[in-house]
Image: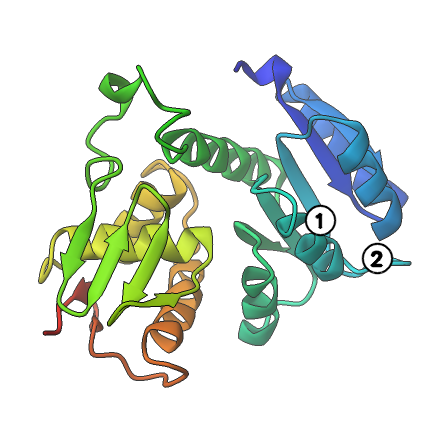
Amino acid sequence: MGISETIILIAEDDERSRAALRQHLQTAGYQVVEAADGEAALLQFERFPVDLIILDVLMPKMTGLEVCQWIRQQSDVPIIIVTVLGSADDRVAGLEMGANDYMVKPFSGRELVARIRAILRRTQRHHSPQETEGRSSKLGAHGPKPYTAIQAGVLTIDAATRRVYKNGQLVRLTEIEFHILRLLASEPNRIFSRAEILQQIWGYASSDRLDTKTVDVHISRLRIKLEDGKSASRFIMTIHGRGYTFVAQG
């Protein structure tokens, strides 16, 4: 799918901000549909075959987080949350609702377009086995080989179904959390830098402006889920100043 065929939904209640976003995206070659509140965003999502959504958090009728949660029950379409709220709790809230990424206002149009391109590259790389049939040769050296199951101690990472089991019990992860865990577990004891994780999971180029806090938030949530609500982790270790590594537990 080319850029000119990609449809992006902008859900933003501020008219000037929405117009600026529209200009940046149309200049980059994307098709744009718009919504000025949460309810309108859902109507536009149902009306058009949207490929990516930009959601402002503070919208009338339904917040961006509520819209994100509703859409995640229906679709895996990529979602970027944009907000003036920059605390870790705010980022976690958006990511927990299923957003693929977040951006804190103000940000440049160039950075937004780079994020969009990176997310679309990543989502095209991580399609289901049926979607990627006949295209395996195009999957380069980004992360572990596609759709292989990984047994890592008490964890079973089933790439075909995108499910993780701990001692046979399902661990519910978001899409991003799953791909981070699978990447780390594919090479136990190897140290992955935050920048490398961003490049392999999000698809960012090394020249992109990289917000490594995104990785830290996802790792934190992933640890809690793997450890039944505890923040400490036996599986994913922080190597200070270098990144993260996976240690399989028996």
What amino acid does circle 1 point to?
Leu
Residue 105 seen in render: no
Q: Is residue 90 left or right of residue 230?
A: right
Disc 1 crowd rating (10 Å Cα; few below 14, some 14-19, many 20+) is: many
Q: CA distance from mark 2 to mark 1?
A: 9 Å
Would residue 149 appear left or right of 104 to someone viewing this image? Answer: left
User: Residue at 56% across / 42% down in the picture?
Assistant: 76
Residue on which disc 1 sits: 55
Residue 77 percent location from the top left of the image: 59, 39
Q: Which mark is drawn over residue 59?
A: 2
Q: Vertically, is 30 above or below 62?
A: above
Which amino acid type corresponds to the residue marked 2 in the rendered image?
A: Met
Rendered view: 210 above or below 128: below
Seen at 71% across and 49% down, the residue is: 55
Mark 1, secondary structure of its residue: strand
Q: Position of residue 156 (x, y in %)?
A: 23, 59
Looking at the rendered structure, the secondary structure element under dot 2 is: loop
**Would you identify the image quadrant in which residue 53 lies?**
top right
Q: Residue at x 16, y 51 (%)?
A: 186
Q: Are marks 2 and 1 in contact (CB under 8 Å)?
A: yes
Which quadrant of the structure image shows residue 3? Answer: top right
